[in-house]
Image: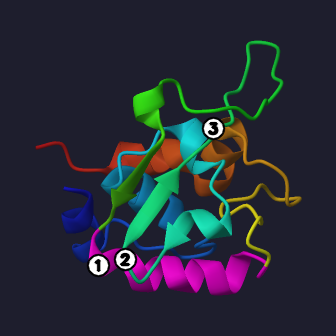
Amino acid sequence: MLWNLAVEGYAAVEHDDRYRALVFLATSASLRWGEVVALVRRDIDLEAGAVSARRQYPELDTGDLVIGPPKSRAGKRTVSFPAGIVPLIREHLRAHVPEDPSALVFAGPNGGVLRRGNFRRASRWPLAVEIVPVA
């Protein structure tokens, strides 16, 4: 469904595309929020079309972010993603991610860990959800 929305123009980006790759990668690879914001450059293999979920940044009730392993042993995994999003991810890495293998792939506005609330505001997520046609 997400792919159809993109093809039909619902995923068009008019101002800032820095979160587009996050949405496509997270949904196509079934990554949790804490896993996708913990990805670093070396976790993505564009040639193989795979991403390794090795850690997560859960946001605690206190608002603190802590780095840790995924929720379970099974959570540590390598997952493939569609070849169709490789150009999108490649462009995101080129435009927004330093060459350092340990650089966060989806960083916040100041280069730190991206928080869910900041993503929702910057991506205008509530508006996006509102305009998605319901089947």
Tell me where residue 118 appears, x and y as whole percent: 72, 44
SS of the residue at dot 2? loop
The main secondary structure of the magenta stretch is helix
Label count reads 3
**Which amino acid type is marked by label 3?**
Gln
The label shown at residue 48 is 2
Badge 1 local density, few (<14 within 10 Å), some, or many (20+)? few
Q: Amino acid at mark 2?
A: Ala
Which region is colored magenta?
Answer: 82-99
* Closest to the observer, 113 or 70: 70
Check the image and report above or below for 24 versus 30: below
Q: Which residue is mark 3?
A: 56
The vertical placement of 49 against 70, above or below, is: below
Q: Residue at x 65, y 38 (%)?
A: 116
> Which residue extends farthest top?
61
Residue located at (29% from left, 50% from top): 132
Looking at this rendering, what residue extends furthest in the left direction?
A: 135
Q: In the picture provided, is 37 more to the left or to the right than 81? A: right
- Give left or right: position of 38 versus 133: right
**Horizontal and vertical percent position of residue 86:** 40, 80
The label number, if any, that marks residue 83 in the structure image: 1
At 67% from the left and 28% from the top, the residue drawn is 58
In terms of sequence position, does the residue under pointer 1 or pointer 2 come before the other? 2
Could you tell me the amino acid type at mark 1? Ala
Residue name at image x 55 percent, y 32 percent: 70
Density class for disc 2 (Cα within 10 Å; few <14, some 14-19, many ≥20) is few
